[in-house]
């Protein structure tokens, strides 16, 4: 099962995960990071500035989970822009090694397969950061997504568009379509790190970690993966049935083990 770590704050989660990423990059300078967007991973990126101080990041590679379809790549809310602003520039990564699915309409039919080939050519993702949608999506794999799915175009649910409206001037400005790594793509990463903060994520987290494995809750796919770390604050952990057990396990964890 997933290792569940309950931390007091999002900043504590950021520090914990950033330390693990720094450990990975020190051991493997051309590590392949799976990058997530949205609010959730921001504390990780913030903590990485310090955690990566003095670490050579010039060979680090990265693949974002998803992108909006039909949004100008230069739009400030395109995930290409977000990844550049939140990750590439502050951490000093090589932009040529950091990839985002191509959501431009011209050529969209081939964009999913091209992205899959690029991930395979890089040797796969070492550590995949994941947020979780209030509807249980990971990446933009909305409820009903096949566990075998690969990178492809999807339609966003009304709930996801409402959740993401805060990033746009008007709710109708949120694109209807996205291109996202599939659940099968995500499950191929060697280590999944799912983060969630706040009461709005509690039901989705409990379902993903302890509920039935079902396409109706795409994040429950993590139960099929052999190496998953779920890092949540108290509010997001509130509906976990075995929270006390997770705390005991974490307290008793040998320091050498890493995440
Ligand atoms: P959020 O989104 O981090 O902005 O809450 C999570 C997600 O949709 O995966």
Image (spheres, rainbow, N blue to C red):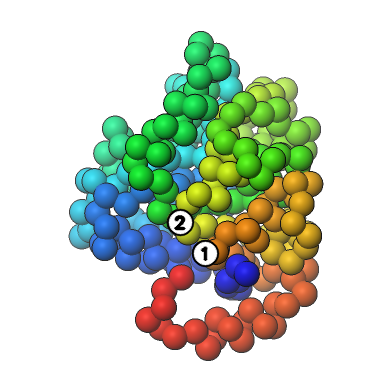
Please identify the quarter of the rendering in which residue 158 is found.
top right
Q: In which quarter of the image is the N terminus?
A: bottom right
Where is residue 244? Give x, y as percent.
Answer: 69, 83
Q: Tag 2's secondary structure?
A: loop
The residue at 69%/40% (across/down) is 146
In the depicted view, which residue is nearer to us: 123 or 64?
Answer: 123
Q: In this view, does 201 lie above or below 232?
A: above
| Circles 1, 2 touching at the beta carbon (< 8 Å) | yes
Q: How crowded is mark 1: few (under 14 residues within 10 Å), some or many (20 or more)?
A: some
Beta carbon at label 2 within 8 Å of ligand 1: no
Q: Give me the C-alpha separation between circle 1 and circle 2.
A: 7 Å
Q: Position of residue 162 (x, y in %)?
A: 74, 35
**Which label belongs to residue 190?**
2
Taking the spot 69% from the left edge, 24% from the top edge, the residue there is 176
Looking at the image, can residue 180 be seen?
Answer: yes
In the rendering, which numbered label is found on residue 227?
Answer: 1
Mark 2, other Cα within 10 Å: few <14 / some 14–19 / many ≥20:
some
The correct choice, above or below, for 55 with respect to 138 in the image is: below
Q: Residue at x 55, y 14 (%)?
A: 105
Q: In this view, does 68 lie above or below 10?
A: above
Q: Identify which residue is drawn at 33% across, 61% down.
A: 24
**Could you tell me residue 228's position as x and y percent?**
55, 63
């Amino acid at each position: 099962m997933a290792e569940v770590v309950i931390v007091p704050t999002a900043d504590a989660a950021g520090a914990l995960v950033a330390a693990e990423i720094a450990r990975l990059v020190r051991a493997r300078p051309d590590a392949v990071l799976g990058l997530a967007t949205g609010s959730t991973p921001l504390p990780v990126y913030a903590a990485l500035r310090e955690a990566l101080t003095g670490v050579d990041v010039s060979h680090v590679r990265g693949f974002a989970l998803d992108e909006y379809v039909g949004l100008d790549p230069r739009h400030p809310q395109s995930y290409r822009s977000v990844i550049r602003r939140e990750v590439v520039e502050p951490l000093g990564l090589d932009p040529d090694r950091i990839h985002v699915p191509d959501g431009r309409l011209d050529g969209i039919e081939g964009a999913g397969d091209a992205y899959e080939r690029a991930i395979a050519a890089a040797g796969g993702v070492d550590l995949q950061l994941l947020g979780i949608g209030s509807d249980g999506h990971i990446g933009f794999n909305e409820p009903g997504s096949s566990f075998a799915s690969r990178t492809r175009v999807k339609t966003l649910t009304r709930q996801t568009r409402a959740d993401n409206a805060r990033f746009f001037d008007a709710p109708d400005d949120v694109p209807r379509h996205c291109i996202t790594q599939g659940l099968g793509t995500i499950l191929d990463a060697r280590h999944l790190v799912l983060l969630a903060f706040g009461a709005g994520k509690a039901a989705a987290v409990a379902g993903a970690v302890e509920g039935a494995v079902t396409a109706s809750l795409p994040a429950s796919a993590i139960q099929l993966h052999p190496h998953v770390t779920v890092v949540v604050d108290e509010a997001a952990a509130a509906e976990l049935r075995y929270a006390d057990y997770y705390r005991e396990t974490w307290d008793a964890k040998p320091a050498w083990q890493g995440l």
